[in-house]
Amino acid sequence: MNILLVCAGGMSTSLLVERMRKEIEKRNLKEVKVDANAIENLEKIIDDYDVILVGPQIRYKEPYIKNLCDEHKKPYTIIPPAIYGLVDEARILDFALNLKK
């Protein structure tokens, strides 16, 4: 399973991605990969991912993200601001895993 975190520039999710990778390793989820990228690149790379997680700071782009994800049949969700702000990698990983079910 490939998870993509998108935000304005791909930078604010970098710390979260690193922490999620450690959580993935801790849980021994060898089939799970996570990356971060800027929203501007989503259209070009969406097919490489199974689940799209959206940083709350770009929630205003949800109509665009929803249309693109619907078109490519990809589930997505906006990460709740409280969880994102705490950089709660375990809960965010759970969000992604449950989104794919």
Image: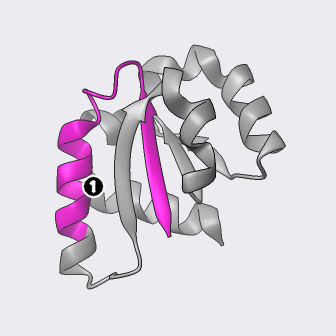
- Give the image location of residue 43, x and y in percent: 63, 32
- Provide the residue designation for mark 1: 89
* Furthest residue toward front: 44
User: Height in image: 59 above or below 90?
Assistant: above
Q: Is residue 87 visible?
A: no
**Residue 5 vs residue 71: left or right?**
left
Q: Residue at x 55, y 41 (%)?
A: 45
Q: Is residue 22 visible?
A: yes
Q: Which residue is farthest top? A: 60
Mark 1 belongs to which amino acid?
Answer: Glu
Question: Is-magenta flag for residue 11?
Answer: yes
Q: Residue at x 35, y 35 (%)?
A: 82
**Where residue 41 appears, x then y in whole percent?**
50, 28
Image coords of residue 44 (percent x, y):
58, 35
* Residue 14 within the magenta-colored segment of the rendering: yes
Left or right position of 10 against 55:
left
| Direction from residue 71 to residue 98 in the image, left or right | left
Q: Which residues are magenta?
A: 1-23
Instruction: Identify which residue is drawn at 27% across, 55% down.
Output: 89
Quadrant of the rendering where the C terminus is positioned: bottom right
Q: Residues within 10 Å of mark 1 (few under 14, many from 20)?
A: many
Horizontal relation, residue 58 to residue 85: left or right: right
> Which residue occupies the foreground of this view, 85 or 20?
20
Helix or strand or loop: what does disc 1 sit on? Answer: helix
Q: Against 30, is 56 above or below?
A: above
State the image coordinates of residue 75 (x, y, percent, origin top left).
68, 52
